[in-house]
Image (cartoon, rainbow, N blue to C red):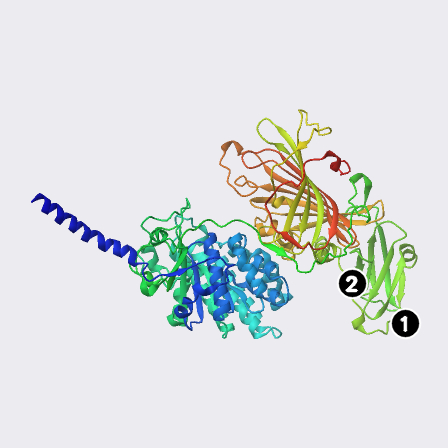
Amino acid sequence: MTDNKTIISLLLSLFTILPLAAQNTSQFEELVEIKSISPSDANYQDLQFLKKEIGETRVVALGEAQHDFGELYEAKTRVVQFLHEEMDFDLILFESGFYDLKKAHEAIQNGESAKLHLGNSIFPIWTLRKEFHPFINYVASHKDSLGVLGFDSQAIGDDYITDFEEDILRLIGDDSENVFYDWLEFVEVISEFNFPDDLVSHLYFQKINTQIKNRIQENAVATKAEKDFYIHLLDNLSLMAKDYYKNRTGDKTAETFQAEDNNVRDRLMAENTLFWLNRYPNKKVILWGATAHVANQVGDLDEEEFKTFKPMGYHLNESLGEENIFTIGFTGFTTDSTCASSPTSLEAKFTKEGKKAVYLSAKDFKPFNSHALSLFDPNFEGKWENVVDGLILIDTLTRATVSSIELTVDTPKDAGSEKVTASNVESVEVKSDTARYVIFNREDESLVKLKGKIRDKNSKEGIPYINIGIPNTLLGTSTNTKGEYVLQLPKGENRTIRISSIGYMPLELSVKQFKENPVIELEPSIRELTEITVTDKPLTAKAIMKQVIKNIPNNFIQTPFSQSKIIRFRGWVDSLTFKQREVLFNDYDLNGYQKAKVHAGGKKRSITVKQSRIADVPKGRDFTNLAFENDSRDFSWAWMFYDAVDAQKRNFLNKANLRKYDFELEEIIESEDGELQYLILFKTDAKSIRTTNLLGVKELRGSILINASDFGIERVEYLAFVDKAYRMWGNVLNRKELSDIVFYKKVVTTYKKVGNHYFLDHKLFQTNFDKHLPIHIFHEIIGLDVQVGEKDSVIINQRKVYPQEEYNPKDWEHLPSK
């Protein structure tokens, strides 16, 4: 009897187990195996099933369960290649800046580097990952048949903010500058995912945003397509400002942020996508983004938070019809400590199938739970067939590798280029205080003050608004309505004064001649008015700064160059040892001194370390006879290499920022060799990183020494006072004992003229706080030889490099010290 009960019990157990086992395996009965996820595998036989799945659908959305996982990037890239080559998809809309990728797309169409512009415009969570680089390489090699644009509503990125400012000003006209700069300040705040929380600011922004839209609409020169784009962009900004003001989205933490807080962004991303679909009605389009955005809807999953969230895919289905968009989610199993897959998830069960990757059609979905929407969220159950049209599962997901794109130049541009060095070209160096003297300031009584009158040679009547000044400087004045002038000049009889005006022959006189002729007559000119230019400009600090900015492309090289440098560090290595470390390296800058942001994805440069040495500094800080030895440690670099001209997009060298600084012409200086220099003081209490290129700054003040003949920058010195709540890189200090310390950062940079351009001569950096405690930090960079030209192939934006050679004292003997 007992045996019969046991048998019956076992049979019942089997009947209970078998359906469960069948359920677990049946989920994968209809799967399609994908043999490879490698973009280098161009045998697409395993992807042919997608032709039947997608059919004639115009839009295919490729979602990823989480950014920053390499296998997802690789698998999506291979599918992109298949869709392009075998199904004629020819436009990719990317989850990156709507404006930025439009500018990148135009530049690529005009023949500029696709790799460079895609690297600058697609968000760095992709471009700075090694596994994504095949995507960039593929698009670059197929740029004639495959374009990339953006649909993200998030505000303008640093690489294109200056282009954005110039584009808007061009469309609305210079007479709207005052309103424009007020508006631009709000745009900067929106770019930081925030907005002032007062109603007056909100209403004012909406008012001037509408005014700018109207001015764009009234522009008689711009094309309709151009005006439509910028008006659409400003509509984005208006809705983002309203959202940030009303919902305080930028103030929320990871704990308080809800899915519905993305509703405005997702709706705008859908509208941006529809904008491009309407702009290019004959294009077949691939969407690349997070599955949480491109999902058809998420309300049918078992998460209360999703009931009020409408992703961009929801809006696209509403507008296009579900038959015109096909969505594939990419997911997989991971053991990553931050988001390990649940053992009960669909992804975990798939790993037992022994396949690299598979495709599951939504038509064959059985009930399951998955983290295909986000690896960092719990597994969700529900009607997944309403979320995506198919899933691609990958057996193992690992974090992507941080790496920068390799830019390969097909035709080296430095072939036969001359090596320009400081030794074979006369350099212009900033003189020390003892080697120069002040010849003019606002209170200097030793000025030469000249008074007189300029009149017409024939009529003998005074000529108004005549330009009088020293050529190639801003030293000068103009006559009043009676032709009278008052001119203040530095002492010196040998200077030339130029007199010019529309309709009269120009005249040049020495200072001595000018003194001897208080009444000067000009002869009328028979030349056409178009041949005459007005050069009179007031001698003000801001006028000088505008000329400095205007002449940066002439004074600072805009093409690739290399410069040998030494960097010297001094500081505590531990609590007992004070050391000096020196590194001899080559700095290759692909951008030159073009406008570019100085953080990841902007400036393109590579560091090659030749040798590195280190020495203990004895008590008393005697640095004269240090006992150096080889230093084989890696050399990490980042922000320390960037100087004021590198950072021109985010400081006083950006025309849009001039109004945020106070400038004062302190003095005009004459060096021993007779060169005139302007010394300008500046300060600002602006706290935005886009204005100062600094985090946590309370006040910034400094000076700029400018060559008066070409408006080249010879020296920049500034002192930044940093908020106690910040370290240099923005981390919060929570130490009560630091409350009375004034944190500062001091930087002094000098430039030397090599050939026709200025290059780094010396940079000194000092601060009194570091990663853990307030402590004195010192480093300096010494600029050596310069070589102009582009290299064949280089890894850009490396962050760590190792010395190529052992330390050899002889290689350091001829090098300068500061």
Residue 94 appears at what percent x and percent y? 50, 62
Pick the residue in front: 467 or 97: 97
Query: Would you call the spot at circle 2 few (<14 residues within 10 Å), some (14-19), or many (20 or more)?
Result: some
Is residue 338 found left or right of 136 in the rendered image? left
Residue placed under numbered mark 2 in the picture? 535
Residue 294 appears at what percent x and percent y? 42, 62
Mark nearer the viewer, 2 or 1: 2
Q: Quadrant of residue 387?
A: bottom left
Pick the residue in front: 661 or 155: 155
Is residue 166 found left or right of 353 in the rendered image? right
Q: Quadrant of residue 574?
A: top right
Pick the residue in front: 229 or 390: 390
Task: Give the Cα distance between marks 2 and 1.
Answer: 24 Å
Q: Are marks 2 and 1 in contact (CB under 8 Å)?
A: no
Residue placed furthest toward the top: 619
Residue placed under numbered mark 1 in the picture? 458
Is residue 267 found left or right of 13 in the rendered image? right
Q: Amino acid at mark 1?
A: Asn
Q: Quadrant of residue 59?
A: bottom left
Res 203 seen here: no
- Point out the tag, 2 or 1, that comes first from the N-terminus: 1
What SS does tag 1 mark? loop
